[in-house]
Image (tube, rainbow, N blue to C red):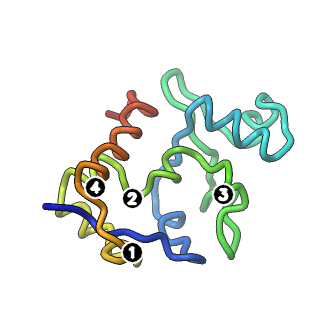
Amino acid sequence: MDGLRFHCLPGCTRCCTQKGFVYLTEDDIQRAAAFLNLAPAEFERRFVYRTRRLRRLRMKRQCPFLLADGCSIHPAKPTQCRLFPFWPELVEDRKNWRRVSRYCPGIGTGRLIQIGTAVDRASEMKTAYPELY
């Protein structure tokens, strides 16, 4: 595989409506709290579920920041969201990349992203969430 094509399509929120969790780093919490003019402790009390090893957004049916027209905290969105679809499990496995393309219309569009660049971006996930990798 020489590279991957991906371009996030304005108005698309399909990645945000998939089953799963949105994991958070401490930096994600700080950034989102500042964006919402909340103290980090208040942001965490309202929006974060914490285990001994991981932090994730509290989500009943969907992300609490997802609106009809997109992410309400887009400039401060979590690392996991910012990097999608450049996650190790997608970039490193062509079958997984194709599977996700079924719901992500941006996969396969846009300019060619060299595989080395895609792998570098995916490695940010491993750095941000070592507990998951």
The circle drawn on residue 85 is: 2
The residue that label 1 is drawn on is: 103
Q: Which residue lies furthest to the top in this view?
A: 52
The mark that comes first in sequence, 1 or 3, is: 3
Q: Is any atom of residue 111 visible in this view? A: yes
Q: Which amino acid does label 2 sit on?
A: Pro
The mark that comes first in sequence, 3 or 2, is: 3
Q: Where's residue 27, x and y in %?
A: 62, 32
Q: Is any atom of residue 64 visible in this view? A: no
Q: Which of 54 and 30 is in front in this view?
A: 30
Report how far apart the C-alphas of labels 3 and 2 lie in the structure: 16 Å
- The answer to whether the residue labelled 1 contacts the one labelled 3, judged by CB atoms less than 8 Å apart, is no
Quadrant of image for the N terminus: bottom left
Q: What SS does tag 4 mark?
A: helix
The residue that label 4 is drawn on is: 90
The circle drawn on residue 74 is: 3
The mark that comes first in sequence, 1 or 4, is: 4
Left/right of residue 32 with respect to residue 60 in the rendered view: right
Q: What residue type is labelled 4?
A: Leu
Up the image or down, 45 lies above or below 47; here it is: above
Q: Residue furthest left?
A: 1
Which quadrant would residue 63 be assigned to in this image?
bottom right
Which quadrant would residue 124 be assigned to in this image?
top left
Q: Which amino acid does label 3 sit on?
A: His
Q: Which of marks 1 and 2 is in front?
A: 2
Up the image or down, 71 lies above or below 120; here it is: below
